[in-house]
Amino acid sequence: MNPVALYNHDAPISAAQQHQFDPYEMNGGSSLVIKGADYCLIASDTRQSDGYKINSRYVPKAFKLTETAVLATSGFSADGLALFKKLSQNLEWYKHAHDKVMSTPAIAQMLSNTLYYKRFFPYYTFCLLGGIDEQGRGVSYSYDPLGSYGAEPYKSVGHKNQQGVQRTDMSLDTAISIAKDAFTSASERDI
């Protein structure tokens, strides 16, 4: 049989279909950091969602790195957890090699380097790092997924917004009250 006869030349040609592999998922959630003269407040919710589904209400997004530094993430939960484990491992190696704990500003640079190292297949997580520096002052940093970072007096990442965050110096009690109000109102808006 003639193979040309099997092909219908008058049939419409369908468009090429592109493979739609997406390794990332936005699991929602929010984190915020507010720094003061002698404190740094980091807060995050524990809800992990996928579209209109709530997978869990008990997934942490804030991780203690040292006695003076905390990492908070938002975005893809698995990448946030993997990043925390990588940073914890690097901090442990540093402690064994130098016999001291890494300072919070040094952790900030290490986090930037770690994110930049994965720039071609990045951690899909938006990070906040907060803590206390060597002089006892509050410090806070925000990051994009590729490692670019900057010092911020306050910042929130995730699905919520920064309504209710004042732009002035505030006490720790005021910062805690604002963080609670922000997460309460944001959880009512978030699906």
Image: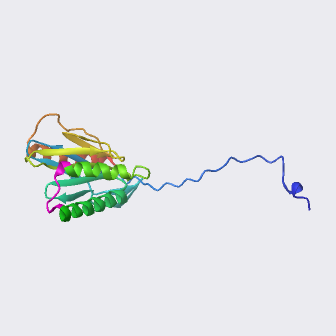
Residue 50: image quadrant is bottom left
Left or right: residue 191 versus residue 61 is right
- Residue 134 visible: yes
Q: Is residue 99 magenta?
A: yes
Residue 73, how many percent across, how many down?
A: 29, 52
Q: Quadrant of the N terminus?
A: bottom right
Residue 114, how many percent across, how many down?
A: 32, 53
In terms of secondary structure, what is the magenta stretch mainly? loop
Numbered disc total: 0
| Residue plotted at (75% across, 47% down) | 13
Q: Residue furthest right?
A: 1
**Along the viewing direction, whichever of 90 and 20 lies nearer the viewer:** 90
The colour scheme used to paint the residues is: rainbow
Residue 35, how many percent across, how many down?
A: 15, 43
Residue 128, how many percent across, how many down?
A: 25, 48
Left or right: residue 151 versus residue 171 is right
Magenta region: 98-105
Q: Residue furthest front?
A: 97
Left or right: residue 9 versus residue 153 is right
**Along the viewing direction, whichever of 190 and 71 lies nearer the viewer:** 71
Position of residue 92 relative to residue 37, above or below, is below
**Along the viewing direction, whichever of 104 and 129 lies nearer the viewer:** 104
| Residue plotted at (10% across, 47% down) | 39
- Residue 59 visible: no
Q: Is residue 154 magenta?
A: no
